[in-house]
């Protein structure tokens, strides 16, 4: 089974983000039900590894925190745009949680993540070279800011690939502690 750990988003936020979709050349828009902030992609895992991952994640202690989505951007590979995203405001509590997850997974023998963590919500995957409306989209959504989202748990998801869009299943939710008082 393919696994990843993510923060679920409130349905209202997902609907707002899904409403950004328009006829953009080469874009495969992510359906609202699949939108999330990935904390760590794991990939293929055996049943035994999944149990070890579950135990490692259940042992993590971290407080809840507010999160704000902000700005728009894209990822490239080999000079070609591969995905379009909405970013996450700088957030030390999120980075601390992601670091704890990375440490816990490395302790059970998973290889370290090679890429630098860049929290975001993927809006679209780009199958073709981008057209002129791509820059227009990024510029028009670069000032986007969501209302604060209270993060109270993280979720271990399984992913089942299909031709159209992957189907994500929430396998286990791990509650975070009460957010510290300001």
Image (cartoon, rainbow, N blue to C red):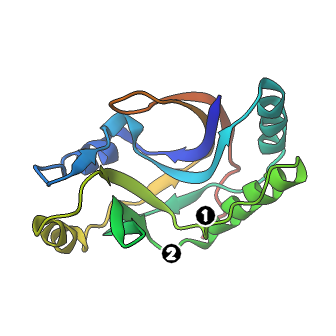
Residue at the (20%, 52%) spot, across then down: 26
Residue at the (68%, 48%) spot, across then down: 176
| Residue 155 is at least partly visible in this image | no
Q: Which mark is residue 90?
A: 2
User: In terms of secondary structure, where does tag 1 sit?
Assistant: helix
Pointer 1: what residue? 94
Q: Which mark is residue 30?
A: none
Q: Label 2 to label 1, Cα distance in Å?
A: 8 Å
| Image quarter hosting the C terminus | bottom right
Q: Residues within 10 Å of mark 2 (few under 14, many from 20)?
A: some
* Left or right of 21 in this view: 31: right
Q: Position of residue 149 (x, y in %)?
A: 44, 54
Q: Please tell me in which quadrant of the rendered image residue 98 appears.
A: bottom right
Q: Please tell me in which quadrant of the rendered image residue 130 appears.
A: bottom left
Q: Residues within 10 Å of mark 1 (few under 14, many from 20)?
A: many
Identify which residue, 118 or 149, lies in the foreground: 118
Identify which residue, 19 or 25, lies in the foreground: 25
């Amino acid at each position: 089974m393919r696994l990843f750990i993510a923060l679920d988003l409130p349905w209202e936020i997902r609907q707002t983000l899904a409403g950004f979709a328009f006829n953009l050349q080469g874009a495969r828009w992510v359906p609202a039900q699949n939108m999330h902030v990935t904390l760590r992609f794991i990939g293929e895992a055996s049943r035994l590894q999944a149990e070890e991952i579950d135990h490692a994640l259940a042992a993590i202690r971290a407080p809840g925190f507010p999160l704000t989505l902000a700005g728009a951007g894209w990822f490239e590979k080999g000079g070609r745009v591969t995905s379009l995203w909405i970013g996450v405001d700088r957030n030390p509590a999120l980075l601390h949680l992601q670091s704890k997850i990375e440490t816990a997974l490395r302790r059970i023998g998973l290889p370290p993540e090679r890429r630098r963590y860049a929290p975001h919500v993927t809006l679209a995957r780009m199958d073709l070279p981008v057209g002129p409306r791509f820059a227009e989209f990024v510029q028009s959504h670069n000032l986007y800011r969501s209302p604060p989202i209270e993060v109270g748990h993280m979720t271990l998801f399984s992913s089942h690939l299909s031709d159209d869009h992957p189907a994500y299943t929430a396998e286990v939710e791990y509650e975070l502690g009460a957010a510290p008082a300001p």
